[in-house]
Image: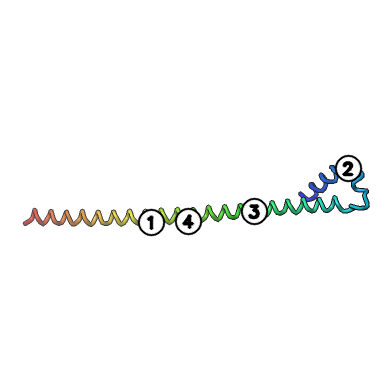
């Protein structure tokens, strides 16, 4: 569809005598093909850039999830140690008071 629009624009912009020259009968067609190829390359580049961005976002999300998981695990470990220490202190206190 874009190719047709580009070709139509080029044909409309070309001077009337330009299409009648025997030395360059395919100039308009070549120009339209070049424009279509450039449009296709641009679309491909945009698609690739979008794909790279999506991969980067997915990787960043994965890293963030790993960091969050690690933080939760570290917090749980600290909480576990704190509870163990509190239980030990309580046991020691009870032993002292019951002697």
Q: Residue at x 84, y 42 (%)?
A: 13
Q: Residue at x 93, y 48 (%)?
A: 20
Residue identified by numbered label 1 = 70
Q: Residues within 10 Å of mark 3 (few under 14, many from 20)?
A: few
Residue identified by numbered label 3 = 47
Residue identified by numbered label 4 = 62
Inter-mark Cα distance, 3 to 4: 23 Å
The quarter holding residue 88 reads bottom left
- Name the residue nearer the viewer: 8 or 78: 8
Inter-mark Cα distance, 3 to 2: 36 Å
Give the mark nearer the N terminus: 3 vs 2.
Answer: 2
In this rendering, which labeled residue sits more in front, label 3 or label 2? 2
Inter-mark Cα distance, 2 to 1: 69 Å
For residue 87, say whether it is visible.
Answer: yes
Residue identified by numbered label 2 = 15
Give the mark nearer the N terminus: 2 vs 1.
Answer: 2
Give the mark nearer the N terminus: 1 vs 4.
Answer: 4
In this rendering, which labeled residue sits more in front, label 1 or label 3? 3
Q: Is residue 29 left or right of residue 58?
A: right
Q: Is residue 98 above or below residue 5?
A: below
- Name the residue nearer the viewer: 15 or 44: 15
Inter-mark Cα distance, 1 to 4: 12 Å
Dot 3 and dot 4 residues touching (CB under 8 Å):
no
Coordinates of residue 4 in the picture (x, y in percent): 80, 49
In this rendering, which labeled residue sits more in front, label 3 or label 4? 3
For residue 1, say whether it is visible.
Answer: no
């Amino acid at each position: 569809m874009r190719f047709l629009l580009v070709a139509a624009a080029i044909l409309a912009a070309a001077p009337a005598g330009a299409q009648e020259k025997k030395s360059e009968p395919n100039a308009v067609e070549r120009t339209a093909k070049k424009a279509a190829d450039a449009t296709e390359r641009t679309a491909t580049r945009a698609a690739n850039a979008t794909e790279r961005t999506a991969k980067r976002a997915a990787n960043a999300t994965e890293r963030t999830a790993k960091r969050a998981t690690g933080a939760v695990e570290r917090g749980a470990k600290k909480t576990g140690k704190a509870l163990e220490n509190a239980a030990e202190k309580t046991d020691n206190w009870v032993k002292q008071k019951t002697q």
